[in-house]
Image: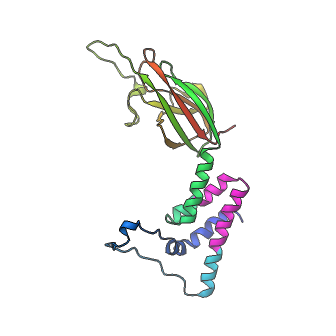
């Protein structure tokens, strides 16, 4: 069965799944009645059509499981993501997607040292577009400045592109060549957080600062993902 066929199957049975996969509320809320009960779709009255719907569900889940068994995790992930988009509360699809993402996050790992007093530093890791990346960051570094009453002029390339990025933050970029570093848009790299690679390329890391030469210290960054070759 092709992936396109699977998507059509999922679309056809979305109403049935919404009806059968409504999540149970927390124990402390089960006695409370919602103000506006959700509307449930009407199931097909035709026994043959209902049977066909059930057959579609079984085939869709079997296809995802088959992709997992063959270690075709990208295809399995795409099936589960399609199911979750159509049926957010479908427990089997959510569990399958979390399983796939966990597998992809832990396929490869590398520990990298990032120095505070250096510009962009090559992590040695090639990331794959669309893959989840998990990072763990440990260490302390110091931002050191000496300035007169006029303060420090912020270069254009550092004028805020992302309000979450603060002075001294760990930032990263994904590029295909070091020549792209100056124009690349940096993103925040946080401890214990995930991000998705927006392109296939090399990951570079550094401290977010105007002048790196007077900084001190370093951090260790553990990168977990499915690396590209």
Q: Position of residue 225 (x, y in %)?
A: 60, 41
For the N terminus, give its image quadrant. bottom right
Type of colouring: rainbow
Q: Nearer the viewer, residue 184 or 23?
A: 23
80 is higher (above) or lower (below) than 14: above
Q: Could you tell me residue 170's position as x and y percent?
A: 46, 30
Instruction: Name which residue lies at 44% across and 27% down.
Output: 208
Task: Give the residue at x 57% y 73%.
Answer: 13
Determine if the magenta segment contains residue 8. Answer: no
Q: Residue furthest right?
A: 70
Q: Residue at x 40, y 67 (%)?
A: 27
Q: Is residue 143 left or right of residue 66?
A: left
Identify which residue, 227 or 107, lies in the foreground.
Answer: 107
Residue 141 is situated, as x and y percent measured from the top left of the image, at: 44, 23
Q: Is residue 35 left or right of residue 93?
A: left
Residue placed furthest toward the bottom: 46
- Looking at the image, how many numbered discs can be counted on the residues? 0
Up the image or down, 26 lies above or below 124; here it is below
Whole-percent x, y for residue 89 in the image? 49, 65
Extreme residue toward the left, this view: 149
The quarter of the image holding the C terminus is top right
Instruction: Name the quadrant containing residue 59.
Output: bottom right
Q: Which residues are magenta?
A: 56-80
Secondary structure predominantly adopted by residues drawn in magenta: helix
Q: Is residue 74 above or below residue 169?
A: below
In the image, 31: left or right of 121? left
65, 152: nearer the viewer: 65
- Tell me which residue sits at (54%, 41%) in the image: 134
């Amino acid at each position: 069965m092709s992936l396109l066929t699977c998507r059509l199957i999922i679309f056809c049975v979305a109403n049935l799944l919404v009806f059968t996969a409504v999540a149970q509320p927390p124990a402390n809320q089960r006695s409370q009645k919602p103000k506006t009960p959700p509307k449930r779709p009407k199931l097909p009255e035709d026994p043959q059509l209902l049977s066909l719907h059930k057959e579609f569900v079984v085939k869709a889940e079997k296809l995802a499981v088959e992709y997992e068994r063959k270690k075709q995790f990208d295809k399995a992930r795409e099936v589960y993501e399609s199911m979750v988009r159509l049926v957010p509360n479908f427990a089997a699809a959510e569990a399958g997607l979390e399983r796939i993402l966990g597998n992809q996050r832990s396929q490869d790992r590398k520990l990298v040292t990032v120095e505070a007093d250096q510009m962009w530093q090559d992590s040695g890791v090639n990331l794959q577009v669309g893959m989840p990346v998990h990072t763990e960051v440990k260490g302390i570094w110091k931002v050191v400045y000496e300035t007169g009453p006029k303060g420090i002029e912020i270069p254009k390339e550092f004028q805020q592109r992302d309000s979450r990025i603060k002075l001294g933050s760990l930032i990263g970029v994904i590029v295909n060549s070091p020549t792209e570093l100056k124009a690349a848009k940096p993103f925040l790299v946080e401890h214990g957080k995930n991000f998705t690679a927006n392109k296939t390329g090399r990951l570079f890391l550094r401290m977010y600062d105007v002048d790196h030469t007077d900084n001190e210290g370093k951090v260790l960054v553990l990168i977990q993902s499915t690396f590209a070759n």
